[in-house]
Amino acid sequence: MWSYLLSREFRFTLGIMGGITLLFLLLFFYLFLPFYTRQGQSVVVPEISGLSFEEARAQLEAVGLGYSLDTLYEYRPEFPPLAVTQQDPLPNTQVKPGRKIYLYLNKETPHQIAFPDIINKSLFEARAELEKRGLKVGRINYVAGEYPNLVEKATFRRKSLKPGQLLEKYSSIDLVVSEGPGEKVVAIDIVGMQIAEAVSLLQEQGFQVGQIKYDPTADESENSVIRQFPAYHEGDSLGRGTVFTLFVAGEEPIEANEAPE
């Protein structure tokens, strides 16, 4: 055996095998692998969000890309039915020719939502219940009543609603709300104002300022109102004397837990 391993025949065979191996590696790395991966070639992924499926497919095929439809996504009202709502990879990404782009399509119709029981609840509670379920508050019609800001009736397209009735998500619900016995004042939006200006305006409108809570981590400008409670909603009215809680950006000054004099 040792004589064979030391023989010229073995060295010749070993040389041939090494040459074949070297040739294979050269062919693999310099011919097959670049061809397989299309080295140096790339395609820019187009922006196809918002397009119909047919339009999106045509754009992808025009630049040499494929597509794969993912499970139908949740209905989003800002997109037409069956339009592309998301794509992966994102627009302007460089990919290899023939790469599949994953498409998410909008549903044709929204989900059905059971209408919550909001009758005889405060307007603030009713609004929170509706928004939690993906429903929107539409017109608010104030009528005379014994209790302030009490929801007396809810309608959709001028038809009264009952608890449990199915509606499409994102539907706009109109409310009939009791004004109560006291005088009503149109709600105001003070978010973004400096605290001194906001307090002054609230007091001028007949409202009261309760707690002022400071947030030193807020990104907004120092001493500006970043949130108010009750929150502002266009068309709302509040009873004169309603107490507001204000949330303000910045460090709390000494003895700042009460409204400024």
Image (cartoon, rainbow, N blue to C red):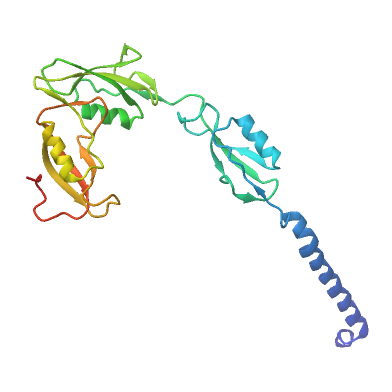
Q: Is residue 114 above or below residue 132?
A: above
Residue 244 in the image: state x and y as whole percent. 15, 37
Q: Nearer the viewer, residue 163 or 137?
A: 137
Identify the residue at image location x=20%, y=29%: 187
Does 165 sit above or below residue 89?
above
Who's the residue at 70% across and 48% down the image? 97
Image quadrant where residue 68 sits: top right
> Left of 11 or right of it: where is 43?
left
Q: In which quadrant will I find the C terminus?
A: top left
Point 19% across, 50% down: residue: 214
Residue 252, given in percent of the width and then of the height, sits at: 16, 54
Q: Is residue 113 left or right of residue 53?
A: left
Q: Is residue 172 above or below residue 100?
A: above
Write the residue at 24% across / 26% down: 126
Q: Residue furthest top?
A: 159
Residue 191 % position (x, y): 24, 40
Whole-percent x, y for residue 95 in the image: 64, 50
- Give the farthest residue toward the right: 9
- Foreground residue among 5 and 84: 84
Q: Which corner quadrant holds the N terminus? A: bottom right
